[in-house]
Image (cartoon, rainbow, N blue to C red):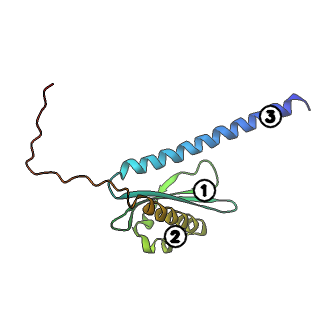
Amino acid sequence: MGWEFAAFLIGALVLSTMLGMWQQGRYARSVNAMVGEHRGPDRLLVTGRGLGKLRGTIVMLVVDDPRDEVIAARVLRGSTIFATAKDAPELHGPIATLPERAHDKQSSKAIEMALGQLKATRARVKDNRIVAPPKVAGGAKRKVQR
């Protein structure tokens, strides 16, 4: 047992790193797709994860802040790197009843974490909201010649 074990160990570490990066890339693409689909004022994207002994769950929620309602939700559930984010229409609706709509223990944990993130995000952006000035009807823009 010489260099073969070291080569095997290094190969396993490289493979593990590559698969982890691939999984992270898939998660990032899923989050970016949700952002692209639901971009708008007063919309917040929050995520949460619930870990179990063998499986885990990640929820991604788009919240319409003034209505206090989930308008889009995806759930990534599984135990392997091949888990994919799937739409979860059962999570759409008012924030107040969101924990009751969870199907399992890991989803409940993930929703609790996402709601904690929502509370922190609301506190952080409360005073930093950018309000666009109202547009004047019939206001003409002048072309400036240089």
Compare marks 3 and 2 and give the one earlier in the sequence: 3
Q: Nearer the viewer, residue 122 or 112?
A: 122
Residue shown at 48%/55% (left/top)? 86
Q: Disc 1 residue type?
A: Gly
Q: Is residue 6 above or below residue 114?
A: above
Q: Which residue is mark 1?
A: 78
Q: Which residue is mark 3?
A: 8
Q: Disc 2 residue type?
A: Ala
Q: Is residue 88 above or below residue 39?
A: below
Helix, strand or loop for disc 1: strand
Compare marks 1 and 2 and give the one earlier in the sequence: 1
Q: Quadrant of residue 126?
A: bottom left
Give how far apart the Cα atoms at labels 1 and 2 are: 16 Å
Q: What is the crowding at mark 2: few (fewer than 14 residues within 10 Å), some, or many (at least 20)?
A: some
Residue shown at 60%/65% (left/top)? 106
Q: Which residue is mark 2?
A: 102
Farthest top residue?
146
Residue shown at 51%/53% (left/top)? 85
Q: Is residue 144 left or right of residue 89?
A: left
Name the image quarter holding the C terminus.
top left
Helix, strand or loop for disc 3: helix
Q: Nearer the viewer, residue 48 or 74?
A: 48
Farthest right residue?
1
